[in-house]
Image (cartoon, rainbow, N blue to C red):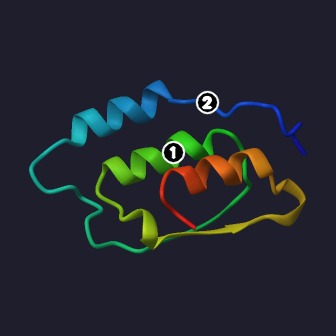
Amino acid sequence: MFPSDQATPRQLPMLDAVVEHVGGNRPPLEGVTLVLIQHQLGSMVPMTEALIRLGADPQKVHWIDIPYTANATVREALVGLGRH
C-alpha cells in the first residue's frame, strides 16, 4: 500500500494524446456505464479523468478495487473527479 501522503500523477501524456486525437462533437463514451475492476494505482486517476473527458458520466463510473491494492490517496482523488 502507498503511503497516504503520496501524490497521484496529474496526467499521462499518452492518454492526453488519445483524448486530443479522438476529439469530435459527440464524446464517444457519452451515455456509457463503465465498470472498472482494477488495482488502485496512481495512474488510474488520470485514466479515469481521460474517460470523463471522452464523455463518461462520473456517476456512471464504478470501481471494484482489488483489496490488497486499495489505496486511500487514489480513492480520494477519484472521488474528487466526481465519482463515488
Pinpoint residue 80: horizontal percent, then vertical percent.
Answer: 55, 50
Q: Is residue 50 above or below residue 39?
A: above
Secondary structure under tag 1 reads: helix
Secondary structure under tag 2 reads: loop
Residue furthest toward the top? 13
Q: Tell me the tag on residue 47.
A: 1
Q: Which residue sits at x=89%, y=37%? A: 3
Q: Is residue 67 above or below residue 79?
A: below
Instruction: Report which quarter residue 7 is drawn in.
Output: top right
Q: Which residue sits at x=36%, y=65%? A: 57
Pinpoint residue 35: horizontal percent, then vertical percent.
Answer: 54, 72
Question: Looking at the picture, which amino acid does disc 2 mark?
Answer: Pro
Which quarter of the figure is the C terminus placed in?
Answer: bottom right
Q: Is residue 6 left or right of residue 51?
A: right
Q: Residues within 10 Å of mark 2 (few under 14, many from 20)?
A: some
Pinpoint residue 20: horizontal percent, then vertical percent.
Answer: 26, 33
Q: Which residue sits at x=13%, y=56%? A: 26
Instruction: Report which quarter residue 21 is drawn in.
Output: top left
Q: Which residue sits at x=80%, y=51%? A: 71
Mark with earlier residue (2, 1): 2
Name the mark nearer the viewer: 2 or 1: 2
Question: Looking at the picture, which amino acid does disc 1 mark?
Answer: Met
Instruction: Give the distance between the C-alpha atoms of the residues marked 2 and 1, in whole angstroms.
Output: 10 Å
Instruction: From the image, tell me which residue sits under label 2.
Output: 9
Q: Is residue 9 left or right of residue 61?
A: right
Q: Is residue 79 above or below residue 53?
A: below
Pinpoint residue 38: horizontal percent, then vertical percent.
Answer: 68, 60
Q: Residues within 10 Å of mark 1 (few under 14, many from 20)?
A: some
